Image: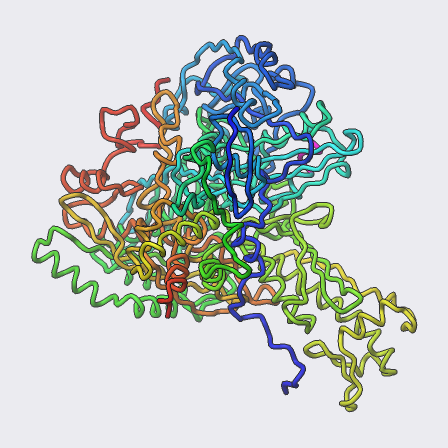
Amino acid sequence: MTATEERPAASVGQPLRRKEDARLVTGRTRWTDSVTPPGTLYVALLRSPMAHARLTRVDVSAARERPGVVAAFSGTDLADDFGSLPMAWTVSEDAKTPSHFPVARDAVRYVGDAIAVVVANSRYGAVDALEAVEVDYEPLPVVLDMEQAMAGGSQLVHEDLGTNVCYTFHEEHGDYEASKARADVVFKRRYVNQRLIPNAMEPRSVVADPTAGADSFTLWSATQVPHFVRIFMSLVCGIPEHKIRVIAPDVGGGFGSKLDIYAEEAICLALARRLGRPVKWTASRSEDYQATIHGRDLIQDVEIAATTDGKMLGLRVDLLSDMGAYLQLLTPSIPLLGRYMYPAIYKFETHSFHCTGVFTNKTPTDAYRGAGRPEATYAIERAVDDLAAHLGVEPLELRRRNWIGHDEFPYTTVCGLEYDSGNYEAATEKALDLFGYDALRAEQAKRRESGDPVQLGIGISTYTEMCGLAPSRWLGEKGYVAGGWERATVRMTPLGKAEVVVGTSPHGQGHVTTFSQIAADALGVPFEDVEIIVNDTAAVPWGLDTYGSRSLVVGGTAVRRAAESVVDKAKLLAAHLLEADPADVEFDAGTFRVKGTPSATKTIQEVAFASFTAHTMAEGSDAILTADNLMDPETFSYPHGTHLCAVEVDTETGMAKIRKYVCVDDIGKVVNPLIVEGQVHGGVAQGIAQALYEEAVYDDGGNLVTGTMVDYLVPAPPDLPSFETGRTETPSTTNPLGVKGVGEAGTIASTPAVVNAVVDAIRHFGVDDVRMPCTPERVWRAIHQGGAGGAPAAEGTVAYGGDSTATTAGGGQA
Amino acid sequence: MVRIQMTVDGERREDEVEPRLLLVHYLRDVVGKVGTPVGCDTSNCGACTVRLDGMSVKSCAVLAVQADGGEVTTVEGLANGEWHPVQTAFKECHALQCGYCTPGMIMATVDLLEHNPNPDEQEIRDGLEGNLCRCTGYHNIVKAVQMAAGGAQ
């Protein structure tokens, strides 16, 4: 192809600076809490201080008398205002879904469960009046430990369900028992994937504004999923769908925690309807810690059947997954989303998977960055390292003996997934090179030999993941209520600019920039001439929002297709204007040309203006330069990569410090390398945080001990290293952009790399596991006292749960 | 109620406030400077960082009445005709994603560079210890600070 002078430079692949940033660096932002329609009232919620109790009396009358208070309600007062909150994924026939009212009616089931609502004319006045709400509690035994919750005679979180087991799920791929019978080694391990708090920097916030006589409503919410919110608010509050407009304005991060339908959205809508005035609720950070979903919280029993020469034959996985007290939108599905990722990149012949979802008196869990896949990757990558140590094989060598070779793609895994592409050897070689693997191994040997108090460990994680959620048909077969398509509209304006309407809902990912690049290249217009319209159901009627690393693969493809459809339409008009047969018109870089007549050209901008004037039109063509298109993925995309971590462990203090972190990710084609690297950095940081710093701890009364940012260690700048990133590029064959998702890859890969490094540093002391987070206390105990370093806190404190179960909960006083 | 006077981003203000009103809520709810967000309730996250009389403060940890007579600069008042070099560097280095921590991160960086115009990586990380970001892993924030300091490659 010959470049011409007018040809705009291709923008896909360029590290263009983000269009989003101008308002973000100057404070010209609109967060939900910044939206204050005239006459706004403020909502505060009284939350339960008890983890489990019957409510025998909730009296809000004194609160109503407080100055500035406009209204106050108990859960019973609001019984006719809304129904139960939705759960959208039925995972098995035996799955149980308890009622989940936005404000509790007769019992509270976790610390933070809403009991009463106060509406006042000021932010502080609403909170002040909460103290005047009178509540009588009849305390019930608290259920915290999953294994105790399943035992006979346990107190029930939901008495009407008759059990604390939410569901059991079982799937067999091949005959695992046959693999076991052939194996020389049956290697068993229990790993604990602790409970985490997602910590989007913006606490959740909701504003509901009744317009036109409380007949229709505008709802601003700090959400990842405005389209889901609209549908479910209609169903929960009984407001016709077309009377609700949901806007996700600037949203300060989500990481899955804002992929949900929350009580406060229904409460604010109901109050706006009752009072006929706008209302606002904004969580404080500590309120957010109780009332926004938590992530992870699994006990993972893993068994690998292998031969002595390191051939892994079969894999058995048995999970206990803590649902918390209620089911949020996707709660039961999260551990199951990971089930195909336990076999990971390895050629297991058989895979037996079992999962039990359990109710406890804690904040509900749901999707947190990676949603099931980080948990799976942690278990398998830890187990492969531990098995390597058991067999006396180099951990990288064990992986090489079992992974899928680059010449074996497309490869159908034991679970039936077809991995379209990948090259694990190339990514690993590049990572080893960047890392200086051999030199670090030599230094490790030297430190061991000399008995250096600071030992060096090297951790490996060779991950893959499935993302780009998801084929609609697949989701339907698995029991999910929605599809996985994405839709985009591209329209040319009269003066030749482009507007792109797309149903993903960005909250930090840079869609405005990335999608501008895709549309600009497809239309042949400058990057600056593209406007991206998102995050408002009135402007974007169709969409399935942002989660599961789907936005580029699914939404980006929809944008590209819609742009191509616009070009197809424009071509008819261009041919008419050029008095040529459409079959003889070619389009390249924004210009239509008649084959063989180089001087006969029309730019797409000229065609756009011609369609506006409509002075002369092609027969049979509507010549409206707008087109809608859809992407419903046929399969997933499978990013992969190799992450290597070197950790220095001070054996005298137990402090583990990352010395070097290298990752080489293969996410196919890259639209904007700057944004991609940013996603990798942030993802890796969150995975490191799980490995070394973060854990939601409950005491034996069910109180969230890590209830503020003082107690829950979100890593600050000095707690993290800089990262060395590299890429290999094996284009995905399942979408026209050749892209794979990147939003979750870093988080999925990094946690096991770090813990493998910590364990590797001290394995020669007889340590074969350190529970996450690998705090100095735990590492020190593992070295000096054996075991995995103990439960979330030292023995004797309220949070100590014992080594055998060591969930994130206390001893379980049932 | 207490009468206070303050200059906020160059604008002279006189308002009656509750003695308990936090500076950040004064800025957001009274003055309308909603560019400064609130990220926590324990003064850990630093999202609400502003400058008060040339000092970097977390405006959730200062009462509005304590700032009486003072001069406050928020991220909205930082640009003077053109962007402050720290704002430019944050965009150039992709040092923000969702942008919620960004106002505080930028204001803290301005303060850091005034005290230490040429910090090394560790000094940058230590200097921004009071500001949390959940999106970037800090990697590009460190680069942006280096660029703003003139030390970027």
Q: State the image coordinates of residue A82 (x, y, percent, origin top left).
A: 67, 24
Task: Quadrant for residue A8, please give it.
Answer: bottom right
Horizontal side, residue A691 vs residue A727: left or right: left
Task: Quadrant for residue A236, please give it.
Answer: top right
The range drawn in magenta is A231-235
Along the viewing direction, whichever of A48 and A637 lies nearer the viewer = A48
Along the viewing direction, whichever of A78 and A109 lies nearer the viewer = A78
Q: How is the image coloured?
A: rainbow
Q: In the image, is residue A214 above or below residue A481?
A: above
Q: State the image coordinates of residue A516 (x, y, percent, origin top left).
A: 63, 64
Residue at 41 percent across and 40 percent down: it is B58
Along the viewing direction, whichever of A551 and B83 lies nearer the viewer = B83
- For the stretch drawn in magenta, the main secondary structure is helix
Q: In the image, is residue B102 above or below residue B23?
A: below
Horizontal side, residue A248 vs residue A778: left or right: right
Quadrant in which the N terminus of chain A appears: bottom right
Q: In the image, is residue A389 above or below residue A136?
A: below
Magenta segment includes A510: no
Residue at 23 percent across and 24 percent down: it is A796
Whether residue A143 is visible to the viewer of this picture, yes or no, is yes
Quadrant in which the C terminus of chain A appears: top left
Whether residue A175 is visible to the viewer of this picture, yes or no, is no
